[in-house]
Amino acid sequence: MRILGIIPARGGSKGVPGKNIKLLGGLPLIAYTSNAANDSKYLNKTIISTDDLNIAEVAKQFQIEVPFIRPTLLATDTASSIQVVQHVVTYLESQEEYYDAICLLQPTSPFRKKGFIDKAIEKFINEAADALVSVLPVPHEFNPHWVFESNNKGFLHLATGDTEIIKRRQDLPPAYFRDGSIYITKTTVIKNGSFYGNKLSYIENDADFYVNVDTLKDWDKAVAKLPIVKDKL
């Protein structure tokens, strides 16, 4: 199976200006994801999709290919990740490059345990899934079976549609949220406008590695986590 790694990194960050090449522990933020991708034995190639020439030059320094500069239309706050990935697929296929699956690696989730990408790819292949995402457990107090929604009359009902609440924490079914570290999807599913398809698998991440850099507060969290995880990256 041919798998393409894609690192999406636009230049117009507002929460943390210039975050994709801002130095974290002496390295540009995108370097952590670039290094993890380069360590993978299953990614046939990894490219960066960016609209920013400075980001492109930094990516090249870390052996990541820059086949194009992303169109401005796909570098706005409203451009979706699926549109960005579809653009990559369309562009590469126009150059006679074809891949069976895409592995999206967001630089805003910089910390991945060594071998984590390959472990995820192996699970994706072995399960013949349409897609796989990395996840973390939802804390029990936020489990969907304990979450209420308000109806149009202002009354609450369980988000799951259940009529009775599960009383004991021990009886709650496991629930997960996407941690943003890894998305692997068959190219055919990407072309249909989805990252998930009908058969969505998952791999559980280590909470010590979780950070999603969107704000300056998140950046501070990344700085605090780096000494904990750096020897395992």
Image: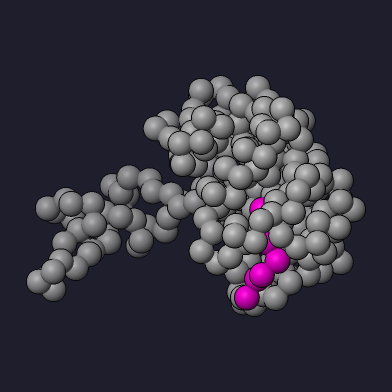
- Dividing the picture into quadrants, the one containing residue 214 is bottom right
Foreground residue, 212 or 190? 190
What is the chief secondary structure element of the magenta stretch?
Answer: loop
Q: Eyeballing the image, is 52 above or below 33?
A: below
Q: Is residue 154 left or right of residue 212?
A: left
How is colour applied across the structure in the image? one colour
Q: Position of residue 217 (x, y in %)?
A: 62, 77
Q: Is residue 67 left or right of residue 122?
A: right
Can the viewer see residue 87?
yes
Determine if the magenta segment contains residue 12.
yes
Determine if the magenta segment contains residue 196.
no
Q: Eyeballing the image, is 127 above or below 112?
A: above
Q: Eyeballing the image, is 28 above or below 216?
A: above
- Dividing the picture into quadrants, the one containing residue 155 is bottom left
Please give the name of the residue rendered at 13% of the width and 73% of the height, measured from the top-left corner. 154
Q: Position of residue 207 (x, y in %)?
A: 58, 55
Please give the name of the residue rendered at 51% of the width and 64% of the height, measured from the top-left corner. 78
Q: Position of residue 95 (x, y in %)?
A: 73, 32
Please give the name of the residue rendered at 68% of the width and 33% of the height, measured from the top-left corner. 94
Please give the name of the residue rendered at 71% of the width and 60% of the height, measured from the top-left corner. 51
Q: Which residues are magenta?
A: 8-14
- Dividing the picture into quadrants, the one containing residue 167 is bottom left
Foreground residue, 99 or 123? 99
Q: How many numbered marks appear?
A: 0
Can the viewer see residue 168?
no
Q: Position of residue 1 (x, y in %)?
A: 65, 22
Q: Is residue 133 left or right of residue 46?
A: left
Residue that lies at the very extreme toward the right in this rendered image: 61
